[in-house]
Image: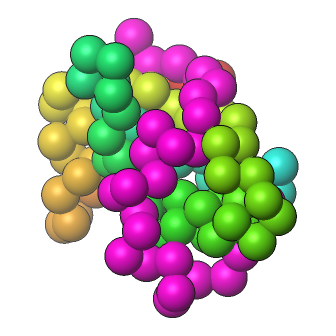
Amino acid sequence: MTKRTTIKLSQIANEALDYTSEVPALDPADCRRLVICEQCGSSYGIVDGFHRTAGMVRWAKENGLVDADVVVIVCDDEDLISAAAEPGPGQAAAIEAIYAAAK
């Protein structure tokens, strides 16, 4: 199942920390493209959206909201996840298919 859900930014923040100095702050409410995640038990892994997440982490730190709520798309379709996470000709189509499935 692919769905939109709200999680705490801290659940995905560690994966994006290396990018926070490279990106502008991004208020989660202004994020036009949701971060795509894979749920692994009680944790989440970013499939697409590392830079968006880094921008949200930067925004949260600048505003003292370390554990802000963020809306993400969680996908459990292994084929789409693999294609979306792998740069190449099928990546864009897989990402769009995940977004379409979450509507």
Q: Nearer the viewer, residue 17 or 86?
A: 17
In the image, residue 63 lies in the stretch drawn in magenta: no
Q: Position of residue 22 (x, y in %)?
A: 51, 88
Identify the residue at image location x=17%, y=31%: 79
Look at the image and tell me in which quarter the C terminus lies: top right
Residue at 44% from the left image edge and 45% from the top image edge: 12
Q: Position of residue 55 (x, y in %)?
A: 62, 69
Residue at the (76%, 71%) spot, across then down: 62
Stretch of the chain drawn in magenta: 1-27
Answer yes or no: is residue 92 visible: no
Q: Give the left or right position of residue 22, taking residue 68 as reference.
A: left
Q: Position of residue 19 (x, y in %)?
A: 43, 78
* 9 inside magenta stretch: yes
Closer-to-camera residue (79/27): 27
Q: Is residue 66 above or below residue 2?
A: below
Residue 41, x across and y down, in percent: 26, 16
